[in-house]
Amino acid sequence: LNLDRLLLWLSARGQGSWSTFRAGVEEFCNDQTDAMPIESDDEGDRSADADSDLPIYQRARFALQRLGHVEFYTLGAENGWRVVPPTVAFPEDEGEMGFLCGARSPALIDNLHKFGDVDVLSSELEDMPQRIQLKGASQAVVVAHASTLGVQVQKAAPLTLLSVLPRVRDEKTWHRSPMPETPGWLVRRFSVSRRKWVEASSRDAANAHAGLFRFVLKHQRFYYLRWRGGCYRVPVQVGKYAVIGRRLRVLEYNPEKRTLSTAPVFRPPLLIERALVLCSGKLSQMDPVTGRIEYTDVPPNIAHLAAQLLHQEIK
Amino acid sequence: VTSLLIVGAVITIGAGVALGLARAHRLRRQSSKHSQLLDRRERSTAAQEARRSTELGHVEESAQPMPAPTRQEVAAAASSEPEQRSEPPQDWGLSGQADEPSPPARAPVSPEQEVVEVAPLIAPVQEPRSEPSDELPQVDEAAPHAQAPVSPGQEVVEVAPLSALEQEPRTEPSEELPQVDETAPRARAPVLPEQEVVEVAPLIAPVQEPRTEPSEELPQVDEAAPHAQAPVSPEQEVVESEPQSELEQQPGSEVEERTSDREAGDPSGDIPAEPRPRAPQYRPPSRVAPAPGPPSVAQTADTSSGKPESATAGKRAARVELRILFERGGHHCTVSLLPVRPQGVPEECTLSSATGSVYLVALEEEWYQDVVPENIGSLLRTGFVWMDNSTGQEWILAGREIFVLAKGTTHRGFISCPRLVLGREHVVLCTTSRLPEVERILTEAGCDRWSQWGESDGAPAGWTVLCERDNAGNVRGLVPRNPLPLDGADILDVLRPLPEIEIVLEEGVRIGYNSWLSGEPPTVRIYGDVEGTQTVLIDGHEATRSAQGAYTAPGWDETGVHQVWCGGITSKYSLITGESNLRPWPAHSFGRVTICGPLVRPFTDDDPSDRSDRQVIEIATTNPVLLGAQPGEIFIASPRRDVLGARCITSPSFYPIWALPAQPLHCDKESTRVLLIGDFVVPRTDPVPLGRRNGAPAVEHWWRVILEASQKGLSVTPETSAATGLWNQYKRRARELRRVSR
């Protein structure tokens, strides 16, 4: 899945609809195969209605938004996507290396190469656009050059992101919403013990004191969290971590390898995952041995902060 | 003067009545001759034209004769039927105006009257009436009255007809022009939005819809065409409505196929199509040499600036393409149907088919998502017609035994195409019964080797997929090398490449119909009889061909417009920088800060975009009190208590200079300091509010916390004389304010 040209194309257009994005994927992700397992039902957060799409679109979408290149279905991009302005995100406070996020163009990359005291390192990684690292003698040098090109700067991006994010059990961030009452919805409940969705009924959902429920009708898919008698519409990953609490310890951190791992079904919510991804500039990778997804180059303080936000304790 | 006006009005009305009577008689005579020859669309067009002429006020005096049935239709339609006219609102509206002694166009009209008056003019467009009417004089008489009240909205609608008429040589007597001017006030009266829609539709429909009238009707069509904005011949109509890029690929066969599809479609356009008696079958293209004519539009396709109109505009039957995707490793393939999404068709629709219903969801703006019916094998063989019963829109696939699919389109995988093209990668899908013949012709076409995917490999039942697969499992398309002569009207001809030349611009980052992103130019390829290709020029320079078949020339990838020429065919492309001025925006909002990609930025409710460039303030948890240069600028941050290790990030509404502890008098003097976090900005001496109102408490808080820190004797960080001096200035300003407050 080559997303380089797709990102260039998106950057040139700025923003658009979901249909436009799919057209771009069709045109630029010239991968004949469509081998992604259909697991996107648990991935959808805000745009759950897009789950009926072929998986490759979701694959491209999740990659771009986790890396901080493009925002989908957010404020200012309610009906589709919008490209983030070109930004250098430094993973550390005083580090001299930053990742280029957001919009990019051949002209911008050419201009970055023209700076003699900044190294532009590009690396091809699977299922994501080229990771472009800007490395200078110091952070100030990189920041100065980036500013001359109009590129935004974010220092200590992972820590800053996590510092402003609420915890998954912060009820103030949930949107109170009634469940659908019309017939025809296929209802499932997320089983914490079995770690998967199990069949349920609308009555179960209506009478439940707590739990996460999924309502599906055709291509529509909504997630509702029952919590202390209230009903909230939440992103699915927020709902999962809210219901599992500390009963399940799903996060593991290896301080030697500096990797944070979890089961695929417990992938962190988008913005927390973005912070973890920006530690290395790479998407999470599936470990074929353990079957867990791993985030690399995660400092201990970031791992612990992420765990607190997820209401988890690290093993 | 009043008497003269009254007399003039009476004379005008009388003349109108007389002319209307004469015209009604003439129309009656001609109506019987023509009424059966015009279809509904022509009547709508003619009605529209006549209505416009009527509104211009010179219907009777027009030196250019209108088609008689048209006038009759308009007259009959514009006049109300006896029962309808007996209804008070309509009758009152028209006759009441006619009785006005003043010039009708200037008569004050209430909104209710306007609606009533305009409606009869519009009604005939929707429901053309063919019966002759005895009320013609009234219509002619009423027309000037009815034209007067027209809203600005209606004026917009009428711009096109007026301009269309202006393109024609006017032969009306000049004395009629003042009548046109008299109608100017019509642009001030309101008209319902629905009326606009009704009026616009007939102007467009005749141009888009295929024409099936007998040839003897063409002169009449041409006569009406100028009033319908453009005289379009049937041949032009076919060419213009097809996607030009596709025409470039196969000018002959493609048009033939689409035309046959269209013939099978709904000719009336406005009326939902009746169910077809049977599914369409593929018909080989005619090999009769075309008559000499103007250059094909296809050859100039790339010179157009915009994207061509969708081939499926209107109610024409939409295409259903085939797509084949191969799984990684090439062990399995998926054959799916890819329906085109015509303009205006909703994102979701349920279609009725012979075997049930088909649910479509939009893939993008011009396509629906792939569907894989259970009986796809038989559907491909027999063809099918799907129809949306609510709109009458049809989707059609002609049944056949051989499909050719090509790579390099705007979609992933292989998409169905008219025929094999020399040099291009293809997949062939054929029924198992035709497999020996197919393989024989593929060999003749120069395809040296291929693999077969049968039913167990994902091909539909009874079908076989032919494609090439290398040892690594990578799927490559069949690439024909030899042109073959056609063998007549047989489906096998789609496997016989023609020796025609085609310029194709592939890959790159295309950001417009003909424009690519500078730095990501298209790959220029020449398909067809490459051996016979003499010279390829790019911008006049002779191009060189790479091993992969891409042509380049000096400067071919520089920003600007470029032209490719080969064998008399040209194609243009432009390279543009495509820079966009992107700005951060509050994508995710959390309290006083927002997130946009990796950016964490401040946010204020009043104008979030205005402050998006400012950094958020990260402060030490020991110094949560932020002070600005203006007395009263004080902000107390609240460090997060719910998580450990999080930074205290906030965004005060002012530019902070100092960060102080929350309670200077009770802090540890050794470990707590006054932090200079901003620039060296001296305290402002602007007048400050006094008392307990108008922000005075904030001012008091501002000077009090400074004096408490001073009283505690907290040291300043950084420990420089400049910082200390600045802190002393703030202390002096605080003391001044304390004295004033007392």
Image (tube, coloured by chain):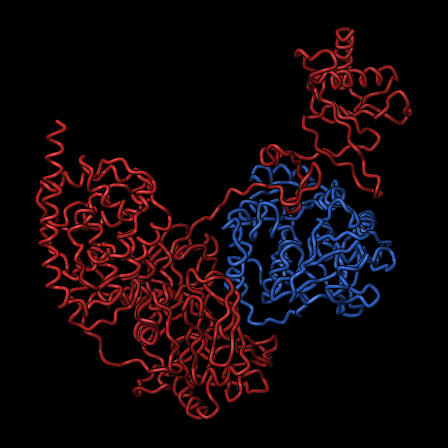
Q: Residue at x 17, y 36 (%)?
A: B101
Q: Which chain is blue?
A: A
Q: Residue at x 37, y 51 (%)?
A: B194
Can you say which quadrant of the picture contains the C terminus of chain A? bottom right
State left or right for residue B723 relative to residue B529: right
Between B170 and B587, the one nearer to me in the picture: B170
Up-down relation of residue B633 to residue B229 (above or below): above
Up-down relation of residue B401 to residue B135 (above or below): below
Between B584 and B67, the one nearer to me in the picture: B67
Up-down relation of residue B510 to residue B705 (above or below): below
Residue A246 placement: quadrant: bottom right
- Where residue B505 appears, x then y in whole percent? 40, 63
Q: Is residue B163 visible?
A: yes
Between B283 and B382, the one nearer to me in the picture: B382
Up-down relation of residue B251 to residue B469 (above or below): above
- Where residue B463 appears, x then y in whole percent? 50, 87
- Where residue B598 appears, x then y in whole percent? 66, 46
Q: Residue at x 22, y 45 (%)?
A: B95
State left or right for residue A295 relative to residue A1: right
Q: Is residue B529 visible?
A: no
| Total marks in image | 0
Residue B239 placement: quadrant: bottom left
Q: Which chain is red?
A: B
Can you say which quadrant of the picture contains the N terminus of chain A? bottom right
Between B566 and B595, the one nearer to me in the picture: B595
- Where residue A230 appears, x then y in whole percent? 77, 51
